[in-house]
Image: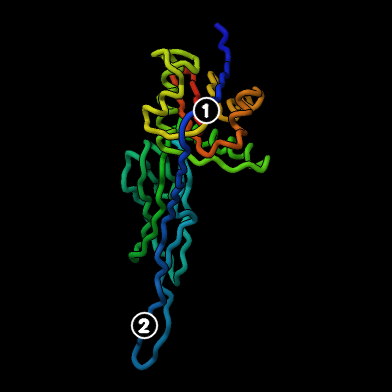
Amino acid sequence: MKRFRKVVCIAMTLVLAQSISVSSYAANIKVVPVRTVTTGTASAKKIVSKLNLNKTSVKLIVGKTITLKAALSTDGMPKVTWTSSNKKVVTVDGSGKVKAIGKGTANITARTSDGKSAVCTVSVITQNEAYIEEVIRLVNSERTKRGLNKLAVNSRLSAAAQKRAGETERKLSHTRPDGTSFSTVLTEYKIKYTVTGENIAYNYYTADEAMEGLMDSKGHRDNILNKRFKNIGVGLYEKDGYKYLVQLFT
């Protein structure tokens, strides 16, 4: 049977807006100072090996790999060994090649034979999480190209959108399986708003394809480019190879 793709949308007005803050992280590596070595009555400076990695933090999708590189500053060539703090999340081989195994966060540590170390923090996400992140990036790209504000990712709105994505597998509509409007999910998740909108996209295998389909539809495009919206939540549900994407806006 030939698969079909479909997008559906709606926007409506209701009760009070909210804001969201976005946080970021970074890992740091200590710089080892120069040590003075004294021989007899003479004093000479000897460079103690310093170890740095080409990355201190990285995000990987499950199944993907990256090779970390260690940069040494030393008067010798100490051996570098690699370890993972959680092999269920990431593994690493003797050359610094890291493979994402499962969702989570782990540290990859490089150590020299003379005791120096450096750490890279690896965050591993699923394919669906990567799809969602790319959809959000593309939405904000479309908005900023037109001089509009970027939408903030709201955790409650994201949870509501994820619930709606699961519901659209049962009923591909802005009406929920219980017969109520999609907007009732916002009340369910205690989300206050003055205006809201929902976009639904079905059976698009990549974020690029989904966004192309949404932007080609006036109603969906109007939601994506609505000046009144400040927040976004995106959900993605997959069953039997079909993807159900929901964007919620407030």
Where is residue 60 shown, x and y percent of the image? Answer: 46, 41
Quarter of the figure with residue 91? top left
Q: Amino acid at mark 1?
A: Thr
Q: Which residue is mark 1?
A: 13
Q: Amino acid at mark 2?
A: Val
Seen from the viewer's position, the closer of residues 88 and 143 is 143
Where is residue 206 shown, x and y percent of the image? Answer: 56, 27
Q: Contact (CB < 8 A) between labels 2 and 1?
A: no
Where is residue 36 shown, x and y percent of the image? Answer: 38, 82
Q: Is 135 situated left or right of 176 in this image? A: right
Mark 1 surroundings: few (<14), some (14-19) or many (≥20) residues within 10 A: few
Residue drawn at (46%, 47%), measured in percent from left and top? 22
| Vertical relation: 250 (above or below) 56 | above
Could you say whether the residue bearing mark 2 is in a helix, strand or loop? strand
Residue drawn at (42%, 78%), measured in percent from left and top? 46
Seen from the viewer's position, the closer of residues 179 and 131 is 179
Could you say whether the residue bearing mark 1 is in a helix, strand or loop? strand
Q: Which residue is mark 2?
A: 37
| Vertical relation: 6 (above or below) 127 | above
